Amino acid sequence: MHPEHPLPVPVDAALRAAGWRPGRWDIKQAEIWADALRRHTSPAGHRHTVFPAAVEAWAEYGGLHIAPQGPGRQIAPATIHLDPMYGLHLARTLGDLGRALSTEVCPIGEEPDNQALLAIDAEGRVYSLDHSGDWFLGAHMEQALATLLTGAQPTRLSVSANT
């Protein structure tokens, strides 16, 4: 966790219940995921882009299955599975979103209840992509985790990779 991005108490509790501890840094697993994503090419030739913000998110939070610890504020809080392999076959979708946002986007996990893909961009901003659209969750991982785990209403992106 970054000192400039403290976690709200319910988010910290949910992360700790999932096995996270401050200072968690599984760079070996992050590198395994990075290699798997870099190696993958879709049948149409789409490839993933891997960048430091994604690797850092995987090293700190990857592999966690996080359940919310209370009711949602505006919407139901989300269960989160932080494993970028959920996005392995979505290189085109992520590439389209990256072009729409003028950045690069990489998978970080999923919201299984909403069948939503979680993704991070090269600047560390986090998004959710589901059947209803593309959503901005936060300027960094800690803000995105707070949005998801507290049921705060995310912001719909005005640009859509689905069009």
Image (cartoon, rainbow, N blue to C red):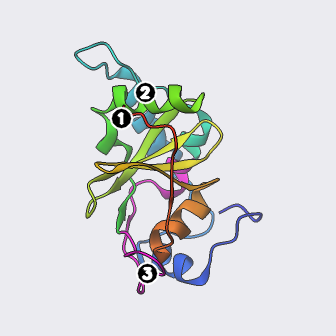
Mark 1 vs mark 2: in front:
1
Q: In whole angstroms, how far apart are the C-alphas of marks 3 and 2? A: 31 Å
Disc 1 residue type (three-letter): Asn
- Residue at 44% x, 37% y is 160
- Percent from the top left, x then y, of residue 126? 54, 50
- Main secondary structure found in the magenta portion: loop
Q: Earlier in the sequence, mark 3 or mark 1?
A: 3
The disc label shown at residue 72, or none? 3
Which label belongs to residue 162? Answer: 1
Three-letter code, disc 2: Asp
User: In the image shown, does 49 or 117 lie closer to the viewer?
Assistant: 117
Above or below, 1 relative to 28: below
Q: Is residue 61 magenta?
A: yes
Residues under numbered marks 1 and 2 in contact, where contact means CB atoms less than 8 Å apart: yes
User: Which residue is depicted at the point 46% across and 77% down?
Assistant: 74
- Mark 1 residue element: loop
Note whether 99 is above or below 24 in the view shown: above
In the displayed orientation, state which residue is furthest to the bottom. Answer: 70
Label 3 vs 2, first from the N-terminus: 3
Q: Nearer the viewer, residue 61 or 90?
A: 90
Instruction: Name which residue lies at 49% across and 76% down.
Output: 150
Distance, label 3 to label 1, CA atoms, is 27 Å
Nearest to viewer (mark 3 / mark 1)? 1
Q: Along the horizontal axis of the image, is 64 left or right of 101?
A: left
Which region shows up in magenta? 57-78
Find disc 2 in the rendering and name its residue: 96
The furthest residue to the top? 45
**Which one is in front, 18 or 91?**
91
Q: CA distance from mark 1 to mark 2?
A: 8 Å
Question: Does residue 64 show up magenta in the picture?
Answer: yes
